[in-house]
Amino acid sequence: MSYKVRDLSLAEKGKIQIEWASKHMPVLNMISKEFSEEKPLKEVRIAAVLHVTKETAVLVKTLMNGGAEVWLAASNPMSTQDDVAAALVMEGVHVYAWRGETVEEYFDAIKTIAKVEPHIVIDDGGDFHAYLHSSALEIAEKVYGGTEETTTGVIRLRVMEKQGILRYPVIAVNNALTKFMFDNRYGTGQSALDGILRATNILLAGKTVVVAGYGWVGRGIAWRARGMGARVIVTEVDPIRALEAVMDGFEVMKMDRACEIGDVFITATGNINVITRRHFEKMKDGAVLANAGHFDVEVSVKELEAIAVSKRDVRNCVTEYALPDGRKLYLLGRGRLVNLVCAEGHSSEVMDMSFANQALAAKFIVKNRYSLQKKVYDVPKEVDTHVAILKLKSMNIEIDSLSEEQRKYLESWI
């Protein structure tokens, strides 16, 4: 069997980690049981570019229980949990991922799993979709359909659809309410701060935290930082989101002003050059820089490198940059996704819903592959609702249902 991981001897440790995650992912376990009986993915080849974590492993095993053969590469060069990668190889997964890949190795892994001519493509960030559409069109033409896990990836796919170059239907798993309302807000809100605290061991209470972007991710980070006693400042370019942040009780201002005040900076915009040289030059001595966006482009590391007179690693995941005037700035995780580089990513409970949507989306694609058009679809409402129902069931929570009288009342205009 083909694979490339760091060390297969880590497999037993990885197996225990996967078991731990599985115990906290009841929805995916219920779907896995259904898949084992129905085999909706029988003889389907799935190639996935995802963060190779213990939670991802539970998704992969669910897909395999549904009958699929799975090839897996990392969606970030620094996010792979090597013990999990080894354990998945022992389970029969074709894994091409290890922590600390070079950029070249990262893209080579994507190219490798593309060569199997997958029926379904699962992506996190859009790099796999982009590769297939730019360098492997003959493979893309054979794909039944794909899914996309992140806001960044969905944005890229929408552009491809608008330009008329999308070669297969894609389900925007990120847009499922049971994904972005929980994964982006509660998941990243907790895990981004977890990554910052593991890397630095600083006290957030009493500090000024600047959150760039007030989308679902930014909201979650801002709320949790405030809950830990921080003074939180939000920067935004969208007037409606900025107004929402004000109404939620946060200070809102331009980054040009916030950069002089903040102790900790967290980017969550999905855009490039959010914090740049002009901001570095005005920051406090000791300011901490972290990125919660998918790609390492939000904090301009290139400009930080250019103005620094020296740099050194002072802790695991913490690089100190000394500036000409003696001030020092601290960059976490090389500017990459802080929750996965400096910690373990989202909790299993949150990924339970996200990956339940992924599994059901794969089933939906296979079932409807002859009728789907080459465009980006939202997760079908019935799938989204089914995931919510299963999650409530796993929590032993019951809710009311509409009576026939109530349903008719809502459907009437009189």
Image (cartoon, rainbow, N blue to C red):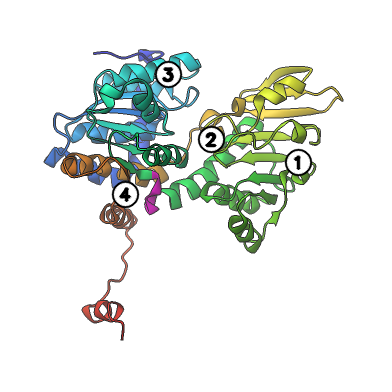
Rendered image: mark on residue 225: none
Is residue 101 visible to us here? Answer: no
Contact check, label 3 and label 2, Cβ < 8 Å: no
Dots 4 and 1: beta carbons under 8 Å? no
Q: Which residue is labeled 4 in the image?
A: 379
Q: Amino acid at mark 2?
A: Asn
Q: CA distance from mark 4 to mark 2?
A: 26 Å
**Image point 12% across, 41% down: which residue?**
38
| Location of mark 2 (residue) | 339
Q: Secondary structure at mark 4?
A: loop
Residue with the mark numbered 3: 107
Q: Are marks 4 and 2 in contact (CB under 8 Å)?
A: no
Which amino acid does the dot numbered 3 rest on?
Phe
For mark 1, what is the residue?
A: 259
* Image position, residue 228 (x, y; %): 64, 50
Neighbours of disc 2 within 10 Å: few (<14), some (14-19), many (20+): many
- In the image: residue 64, left or right of residue 351: left
Please report whichever mark, 4 or 3, sits nearer to the chain's N-terminal start.
3
Image position, residue 383 (x, y; %): 27, 52
Q: Is residue 21 above or below residue 2?
A: below
Q: Of the two numbered discs 3 and 2 on the same chain, state the one appearing first in sequence.
A: 3
